[in-house]
């Protein structure tokens, strides 16, 4: 029999609230391609471009399996030059919680003011969203 689980809105919201609580004062690291298969896959040739910091609390309560981060602290001294294509969200203790795509529009998980990162420049994340698919 095939597996096809789905979460109710209440379960998805509880799952997101549990994860996002771990991100208080954590970080969002922005990287170049290639995008790893998932958040458990080790980084290889990707370049760390910048690191922005979550607020504390990082997220308000989720609604129907969706949480949008509170305003993040900008990185005022970007690590390297390149195009941000994905991010990883880390706890303040450096444990990876999730990863997603970066872009300059709301169709991405992490929206940046500019995906073209300049070394030593300022990097601003305008939106970071975590969504758990519901039934």
Image: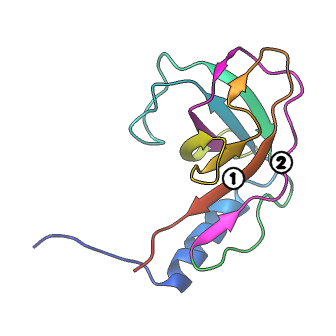
Spot occupied by residue 21 in the image (x, y as percentages of width and height): 72, 63
Magenta-drawn stretch contains 87: yes
Residue with the mark numbered 2 = 72
SS at mark 1 in the image? strand
Furthest residue in direction front, as rendered: 105
Taking the image as shown, residue 120 lies to the left or right of residue 11, namely: right
Spot occupied by residue 111 in the image (x, y as percentages of width and height): 68, 46
Which residue is rendered at x = 86% and y = 37% of the image? 74
Which residue is rendered at x = 46% and y = 32% of the image? 35
Looking at the image, which is closer to me, 104 or 32? 104
Q: Is the image coloured rainbow, by chain, by secondary structure, or in one colour? A: rainbow
Which residue is rendered at x = 73% and y = 52% of the image? 127
Q: Are marks 1 and 2 in contact (CB under 8 Å)?
A: yes
Furthest residue in direction left, as rendered: 1
SS at mark 2 in the image? loop
Which residue is rendered at x = 81% and y = 31% of the image? 123
Question: Which numbered circle lies on residue 102?
Answer: none
Q: Is residue 86 above or below residue 120?
A: below
Span colored in magenta: 65-89
Q: Is residue 128 above or below residue 46?
A: below
Taking the image as shown, residue 94 lies to the left or right of residue 26, namely: left
Sequence-wise, the earlier of marks 1 and 2 is 2
Residue with the mark numbered 1 = 128
Spot occupied by residue 133 in the image (x, y as percentages of width and height): 45, 69
Magenta-drawn stretch contains 2: no
Cα distance in 3D space between marks 1 and 2:
9 Å
Spot occupied by residue 56 in the image (x, y as percentages of width and height): 86, 57
């Amino acid at each position: 029999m095939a597996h096809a689980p789905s979460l109710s809105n209440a379960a998805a919201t509880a799952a997101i609230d549990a994860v996002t609580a771990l991100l208080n004062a954590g970080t969002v690291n922005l990287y170049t391609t290639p995008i790893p298969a998932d958040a458990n896959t080790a980084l290889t040739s990707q370049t760390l471009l910048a690191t922005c910091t979550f607020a504390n609390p990082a997220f308000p309560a989720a609604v129907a399996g969706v949480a949008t981060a509170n305003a993040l602290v900008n990185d005022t001294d970007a690590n390297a030059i390149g195009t941000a294509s994905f991010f990883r969200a880390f706890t303040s203790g450096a444990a990876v919680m999730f990863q997603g795509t970066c872009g300059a529009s709301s169709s991405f998980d992490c929206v940046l003011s500019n995906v073209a990162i300049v070394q030593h420049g300022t990097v601003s994340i305008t939106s970071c969203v975590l969504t758990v698919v519901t039934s």
